[in-house]
Amino acid sequence: MQRPTLKDVAERAGVHVGTASRALSESSRHLVSNTTLGKVLAAAQALGYTHNVSARTLRTERSSAVGMLLPDLTNPIFPPMVRGAEDVLRDLGYSVWIANTDGDAELESAAIASFRQRSVDGYIFATARLDHPLIEEMYRTSTPLVLVNRRLARTDVPAVTSDDAHGTVLALTHLYELGHREIVYVAGPQEFSTGLHRKRAFVQSMKDLGLPAGPDRVAHCVAWSAEAGRYALGELLDAGRRFTAVLAGNDLIGLGCFDALRERGLSCPADVSVVGFDDTPFMDRVAPPMTTIRISQYELGQEAARLLVDILNAPERRNRSLILAPVLVVRCSAAPPGRGSVPP
Amino acid sequence: MQRPTLKDVAERAGVHVGTASRALSESSRHLVSNTTLGKVLAAAQALGYTHNVSARTLRTERSSAVGMLLPDLTNPIFPPMVRGAEDVLRDLGYSVWIANTDGDAELESAAIASFRQRSVDGYIFATARLDHPLIEEMYRTSTPLVLVNRRLARTDVPAVTSDDAHGTVLALTHLYELGHREIVYVAGPQEFSTGLHRKRAFVQSMKDLGLPAGPDRVAHCVAWSAEAGRYALGELLDAGRRFTAVLAGNDLIGLGCFDALRERGLSCPADVSVVGFDDTPFMDRVAPPMTTIRISQYELGQEAARLLVDILNAPERRNRSLILAPVLVVRCSAAPPGRGSVPP
DNA sequence: ATGAAAGCGCTAACAC
DNA sequence: GTGTTAGCGCTTTCAT
């Protein structure tokens, strides 16, 4: 027999399709008498019946599916986020589509079009830029959506992020307490909230500490990658900038800082300390083990999923955002000041 | 206006829905005159029409979706595989659902049920065990499916894998040429083709080299993880087994070997060499950089997707499997023999 | 080449 | 509490 339908179940149970439908849906089960419920359930069980989701979606306009947009799944911060979201959504009866955009607006539009064609109920964006017309337009037209990890410049769009400013203060304070005074910053791309907020917090905290933080102490990366970090710190190094520690926009950039240092015969942490951000998986295993700021990507994903489901159930509550507190993880890449970046 | 339907497009173009449908589907476009085609396309464009996939799926029984089953997305070998599959499937008009099973049969059944409810056209399994009743049953009932990375014991089910035996020979030959003669193996779980075939190749190749490879030189891991590797090699070490090199079932196990060695005051590669398998992302950054066997997970994913689409288009061709050749990557964790595992 | 209409499987509104 | 039925948006067969 082909895949059984409601009609098959109804016939076997000796009831009508409508009744079978009611018995087989959580929400309408209470409309059915206990005896018929039993009969329908037994028939469904015997036949191996499962809902045809396309038919249900067509009828109800609800698919129990959510679309998740990622920059690139091979960036190790994203898999835990996806799992966090998937684990909570699965338990609530949702499935998740994922799409990688590689930061490309075309690919993002295409992915959203595909999700829309499939009638997803809502969206989780891990791809937000501070200025993101596409997301803003979707929000304006009341599409249920939640941002994760990165947020928009405007604060009304619901987002689950970590406290970038506080994390940066934690990192900087650690370096300060180790005795560092000459500190530079290698910033992530400034079109993202993470890039901007972390850098701003660095500049502000340096001032608070009475330390210099002019533009000559801040390098900017074109991407959240080791290669970009290597290049950016390389420029600072080659310009002769003197410093004993560097704070990196994230761990991958921090890895690039290791490279730039090594290429110039400088040792980390003996000569120069480096602190990363994110506690990306495997950062305890790199050389040297990365001192960093931990944010739980898994939790970020979980909370984003919960928030989205909240919004799906009560659209008027789409005014909430969530901020998770990060934590300092002390490993080996930051130590008391050494010789510094420029040998005497 | 709500999401426009074919009816809206047809009205605007002054044709009937059937005609609009024909014009808007690749496969039936040729049945429509050029002028009406133009009108329909213009109307669709103007209205921002996109197909309602649920309706189409309901009608055609085809969803242009495939389900991909993974053990655990946070194991870094999987994200590239997913991207490989997704990148080729996207270009062919397919979307992909992913589900993590954590090696749990219940979760796997549930994921498959969910995929089935959503009428996926086919499946990519990265979760295959040598003996896998669920997959075998699906194959028996002609469900289009492809295995990736791991295969079944039987060879008729289509799979895209790397040549585990050859990769192992490559690794072992490298150690042999460095001068190692006392070599142990830390095997992955034997219920997977990767675990079994790699171990068997080790034993066979050692024999071919005239080297001892009894069961006392092989440790077994309960999982593909650093923790399991650490424990397994630890047992060998604590039993007083003497060796100068270890070949690990995969890189994560190799990482655990680093740990076991370090905990006992042994240095890698000065005292003991370690070779991994997979060239998992970031293995060039761990300490010491891992000498390993590279298999392109991205390519594995691509080829699995291509093979699945082949099968979808020509079910009678589901008798093909694909084997990709691995390659040795020399880094630092293997060097000429040192003091060995037991100091004199 | 196009129109007309049936029907995919399901839910929900309505009737009893 | 259960039966009946319309119709979600689409494709496709059958007419013309």
Image (tube, coloured by chain):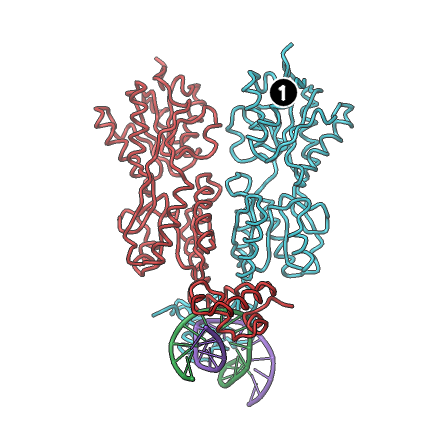
Chain colours: A red, B cyan, C green, D purple
Nearer to me, B278 or A182: B278
Report the residue at 29% width, 20% height from top. A177
Report the residue at 66% width, 40% height from top. B191
Q: Position of residue B289 (x, y in %)?
A: 54, 26
Asked whether the viewer can see residue B29, the reply is no
Is C7 drawn above or below residue A39 in the view shown?
below
Report crowding for label 1: few under 14, some 14 to 19, many 20 or more residues within 10 A (C-alpha): some
Q: Position of residue A185 (x, y in %)?
A: 32, 29
- Residue type, numbered disc 1: Leu
Q: Position of residue B314 (x, y in %)?
A: 67, 61
Instruction: Say which quadrant the N terminus of chain B sits in.
Output: bottom left
Report the residue at 64% width, 18% height from top. B336
Instruction: Say which quadrant the C terminus of chain B sits in.
Output: top right
Quarter of the image holding residue A80?
top left
Q: Is residue B266 left or right of residue B136?
A: left
**Residue designated by label 1:** B237
Residue lying at the far top of the rendered structure: B344
